[in-house]
Image (cartoon, grey):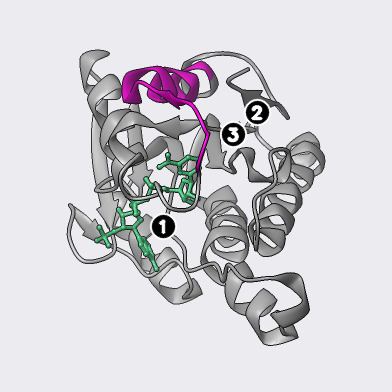
């Protein structure tokens, strides 16, 4: 198994890399400012360069960080929603669109959403929109993938290691061990599931 972990230097990515390495997978860590390969997921050319540099790949796991505006809906602008869609939504979709060309037969894409399209927070309309849009994309587009490719999306709960980062935003949200989040990604990478939203609840 040769896997590309986009966002592999982040909280979710690091946990996924660790679990993949336990399974003796060959892992390529992709980050924005560091990693085996550097990527700007908002740039299609950067995505293509990443695939060219990576060579033959069986699995793409995508957990990129994102800049999503969080503010009351009455203060949101159309531009805020456009900014919010760039990295997490359109970036992940672009990774799939380009990756169809590069992934080995029977390979898999595993994308990342989150619980905030079901457990709403103040100012969270953009993140809710992005998560639901991603899940809709995966459920539909996965059914049309060629060459035995599969695609699923993990909706992670709040990681223990991310609790401090999100403490002001996610009050009352329970945390889960990083390794538990990561093994949900492995369910998609090593399993036979397709078109699934992998929920941790
Ligand atoms: N952490 C949680 O508890 C949690 C729970 C549910 C959902 N999520 C979702 O999971 C995703 C990842 O969260 P995280 O907490 O693991 O993020 P994180 O710790 O901030 O890590 C983000 C990763 O994405 C990379 N990155 C940032 N901007 C990028 C860009 N423009 N192009 C390519 N890569 C980029 C970062 O690289 P550098 O380190 O080089 O900047 C890093 O590897 C987010 O969409 C988040 O909403 C997280």
Residue drawn at x 27%, y 13% is 23
Residue drawn at x 70%, y 26% is 196
Q: Which residue is mark 2?
A: 148
Which circle's residue, 3 or 2, is located before the other in the chain? Answer: 2
Q: Is residue 159 above or below residue 1?
A: below
Marks 1 and 2 sit apart, C-alpha to C-alpha, by 29 Å
Q: Which residue is mark 1?
A: 65
Marks 3 and 2 sit apart, C-alpha to C-alpha, by 23 Å
Question: Residue 25 appears at what percent x and percent y?
Answer: 27, 22
Which residues make up the magenta segment? 171-187
Q: Which residue is mark 3?
A: 155
Label 3: few (<14), some (14–19) or many (≥20) C-alpha neighbours in 10 Å: many
Label 1: few (<14), some (14–19) or many (≥20) C-alpha neighbours in 10 Å: some
- Foreground mark, 3 or 2? 3
The image's mark for residue 117 is none
Which circle's residue, 1 or 3, is located before the other in the chain? Answer: 1
Q: Is residue 118 above or below residue 65?
A: above
SS class, disc 2:
loop
């Amino acid at each position: 198994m040769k896997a590309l972990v986009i966002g592999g230097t982040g909280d979710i990515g690091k946990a996924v890399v660790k679990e993949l390495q336990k399974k003796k997978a060959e892992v390529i860590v992709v980050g924005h400012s560091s990693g085996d390969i550097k990527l700007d997921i908002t740039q299609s050319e950067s995505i293509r360069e990443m695939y060219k540099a990576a060579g033959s790949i069986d699995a793409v796991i995508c957990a990129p960080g994102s800049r999503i505006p969080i503010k009351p809906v009455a203060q949101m602008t159309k531009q805020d929603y456009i900014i919010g869609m760039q990295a997490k939504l359109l970036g992940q979709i672009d990774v799939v669109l380009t990756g169809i060309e590069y992934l080995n037969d029977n390979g898999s894409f595993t994308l990342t959403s989150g619980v905030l399209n079901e457990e709403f927070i103040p100012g969270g309309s953009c993140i809710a929109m992005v998560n639901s849009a991603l899940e809709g994309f995966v459920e539909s587009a996965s059914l049309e993938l060629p060459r035995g490719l599969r695609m699923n999306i993990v909706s992670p709960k709040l990681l223990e290691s991310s609790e401090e980062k999100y403490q002001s935003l996610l009050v009352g949200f329970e945390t889960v061990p990083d390794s538990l989040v990561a093994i949900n990604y492995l369910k998609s990478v090593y399993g036979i599931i397709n078109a699934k939203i992998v929920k941790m609840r």
